[in-house]
Image: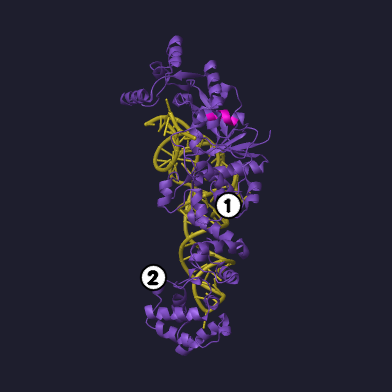
Amino acid sequence: MSVRVRFAPSPTGFLHIGGLRTAFYNYLFARHNNGKFILRIEDTDQARFVEDAEQDIIKSLEWAGMTIDEGPGKGGDFGPYRQSERKDLYHKYAEQLIESGAAYYAFDTVEEIDEMRERLEKSGNPSPKYDSITRQSMKNSLTLSKDEVERRLEAGDEYVVRLKVPRRETVKFEDEIRDIVSFDTAGLDDQVLLKSDGMPTYHLANVVDDHTMEITHVIRGEEWLSSAPKHILLYQAFGWEPPVMAHLPLIMSPSGGKLSKRKAESEGIPVNTKDYISGNYEPEALMNFLAYLGWSPGDDSEIHDLKELCNLFTLDRVSKGGAVFNYKKLMWYNENYIRKTPAEDLEPRVKDLALKLGYNIKSDEYLTTVVELLHERVSKVDEFVSMGAFFFEAPKSYDENALKKWKDDSPGLVKAYKAKIEDLPENEFEAATLKSKLEEVITENEVGFGKLMMPLRIAVTGQGFGPDLFPAMELIGKNEVLERIDKALNEL
RNA sequence: GCCGCGUUCGUCUAGGGGUCUAGGACGCCGCCCUUUCACGGCGGUAGCACGGGUUCAAAUCCCGUACGCGGUACCA
């Protein structure tokens, strides 16, 4: 049977970085096995539904380099791919379960259940909320007479359909990543399958869809592991063969715990995929990094492109423990990808960014040189226009840290240097000459190279770091450089 | 509380009884290159959670403990 996997997010917000990784593992697995990668939108929670979320998910996957084989907007033989459009199916299967005795109608209101829960907790017997005893005291088709149930249904009373979880049974299954996992049904609630608004819960919809869509492998986050036995029970109740399960380790925050929106942001980690898009991260770098967060190919390699990752990825090499998001390593990947990218591919992107900031770009050649000078120094594309801002406009302020290098003798040295270069003809205002002039000044004044170098850099760029200064000055041009030196001399 | 899952350098990981005085990567530190900033090169720092077994031999297998994480909804 050919491999079919799905990424099944619920459209309750922007695609989270953890969701992106889950999608990616599914994608890699599909491609590795020549299978299909399916997107299914699990929009069964009306209350948390977010209008733009689906588009955000699709855009994010596309940006990350994943192509969807079947899904909303894409089509496929197993649609529709939005659960809200498959309501009839779930009802049909829920009824089937009721007929076979595997599920039942329940008429208790949310309030009544809360009350029951509270009472149980106070009685010091907090654990099973719906064991066979409790359930008998509640209003459902297990305890009510057939006529009464009939009457309530016809009267339009609100009801849910619950799975009748068998008691004192062990549910065992083999997880591709965790081996045998087993649960005792005593700890399982009689899960709601159909909500009173007529929508299915995740559990029903998920099982019905995975089966009807012929999903072969369910690869999802570890937060689903505890629900897996419920799903297994459902497959059994339907008489269906469950798909292979694989529960992925969670991505953790550096301070511990699941990488939540709040935590991530307070730690400076972008949490939504769209933040990586707008933050100008390299998708290949992010995906390479994400692939290695909970998986490794087993050798010492670190850098792989999408195609290689597809070739290398197998579930048996996924690790079990949670993986802490390491932002610095992400940046290392990003840097790597930028260096590998040819300058001419970077140029249009840098141009866009510069234009967005309202910078005036003298010429394409000018931009080419800017990119070349900074190529080995930036770790993210937007740094071409931040670290390299001085290529486009005179420094508006001077970096505080760098200013420590502006000493008492700095103005004198800078003045001396200015005197040496101000009479240079335009066509001799080039890197080698500028450098030799600087050498003259330092020997004449018997000071170290850095004594003049740093102040000069500060004057021209406003920073204490950056690209090779002499070619940079050459590019910026004589008039501008002299103006900047004057400005610094006046202000510092 | 209960249930489940996990635990190798600060972090991501390799390792599946002897080849482990535990390998790689990020980070950090140092040196070299560069009379500037980086890149790069070289080197260093640092880890098998703990306690019991099993075995001639355990990071590797078993059992406990601790700790972490997840779940415990008419949310996914």
* Residues in magenta, as a range: A205-210
On whether residue A126 falls in the magenta region, the answer is no
Residue A27, image quadrant = top right
Q: Is residue A471 above or below residue A359?
A: below
Q: Is residue A125 visible?
A: no
Identity of the residue drawn at 44% across and 25% down: A196
Q: Is residue A335 above or below residue A251?
A: below
According to the rendering, which colour does chain A have? purple
| Letter of the chain in yellow | B
> In the figure, is residue A423 to the left or right of A126?
right
Quarter containing the N terminus of chain A: top right
Q: Which residue is mark 1?
A: A288
Q: How far from the left and from the top, in percent, is residue A189?
A: 44, 25
Q: Which residue is mark 2?
A: A400
Which of the pair A458/A444 is nearer the observer? A458
Q: Specify whether disc 1 shares its chain with disc 2.
A: yes
Tell me which amino acid carries mark 1.
Asn
Residue A314, image quadrant = top right
Q: How far from the left and from the top, in percent, is residue A310?
A: 64, 47
